[in-house]
Amino acid sequence: MKNATGIWALLLGLTLAEVALAYPSLAPAVFLLVLLALSVGKSALIIAFFMHLRFASRALTLALFPILIALILLLLGFLPDAQRVMHAA
Amino acid sequence: MTRNETTWEGGGSPFAIGAKPLGMWLFVVSDALTFSTMLMVYTYSRLANPHWPAPFAFSPSIVQATVMTFVLLSSSLTMVWAVDAMKRDDRRKTVQYLSATMFLGIVFIVIHMREWVHLINDEHITLTANPWNQPLFGATFFGLTGLHMAHVTIGVVYLGIVALGTRMGKFKTDHVETSGLYWHFVDLVWMFIFPMVYLMSVKR
């Protein structure tokens, strides 16, 4: 219970950090990378502690996540193409 | 079955969890791919278009979206407490924490609807048109946040059923744990929608 409250406070802190980073006017691609890193960190905390995957069997983690991560990485592979489209416009 | 089968042969519980949470985990992974694809469509369109709308002013949009994040994160905490209470077989506390989670879910939906009304009435953004002449913005924004809001609404109903079953003594710990997995997933998806959709398009 105490642990969950600490994770909740950490998640709130990371959210406020994201909001603070939205205003110094970073380049969109750089800002996106920073936000993605923070979001992945926040979701890892939720999955590990709130969804209790940290305490589940390793077999479950290995069955569920490698394919999900691989597919998301494949999707991310399309993002650099957005820059090509923008410069071609 | 005449003998004890090994885990590899299908005996025992290979993933050391019950059928209900395993089923929910499989749903969560498939649903995560649906949201990933929609977020990718939004982000690709955002990066590819130098004239992408930036309608999210600090007040009310970013303030409201930050409060919504706070509300969803808090609802995840009350959900953790509900599962913890159920493991101690304290059904009264479990129902209280589930009710608190549902209440926070409803608060999230109400604030989100206010945000939608503001964007439609004040910023003149609809599914197919907006003042920036970028129709993809409305389609991707309302599609993505609408799908998420539908998940929150279904989650509130689901938790209501679980709370009722728990109160009547019909449901066990794995029912509450399974509903918790769903609710935390809804929270997790918002952790990507908030920065990718709102913070990437702030009005400066």
Image: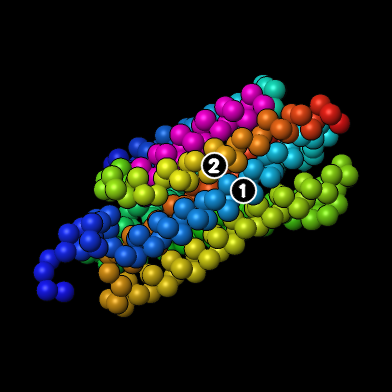
Residue A16 at least partly seen: no
Residue labelled with disc 1: B37
The residue positioned 42% from the left and 34% from the top of the image is A10
What kind of colouring is applied to the model shown?
A: rainbow
Distance between the Cα atoms at labels 1 and 2? 8 Å
Residue A12, how many percent across, how many down?
Answer: 47, 37
The quadrant of the picture occupied by the C terminus of chain A is top right
Look at the numbered disc 2 and give the secondary structure of its residue. Answer: helix
Residue A89 appears in the rendering? yes
B137 left or right of B85 in image: right
Pointer 2 residue: A72
For mark 1, give the secondary structure. Answer: helix
Residue shown at 54% from the left, 59% from the top? B152
Are the residues flagged by discs 1 and 2 from a single subunit? no
Between residue A26 and residue A10, name the one nearer to us.
Answer: A26
Q: Main secondary structure of the magenta part?
A: helix
Task: Name the residue type under label 2.
Answer: Ile
Residue B118 in the image, given as x and y percentages of width and height: 75, 51
Q: Position of residue B177 (x, y in %)?
A: 33, 60
Q: Report the span colored magenta.
A: A29-52
- Residue B84 among those drawn in magenta: no
Picture coordinates of residue B87, whole percent (x, y): 23, 59
Q: Residues within 10 Å of mark 2 (few under 14, many from 20)?
A: some
Q: In the displayed structure, would residue A49 be above or below residue B182? A: above
User: Residue type at mark 1?
Assistant: Thr
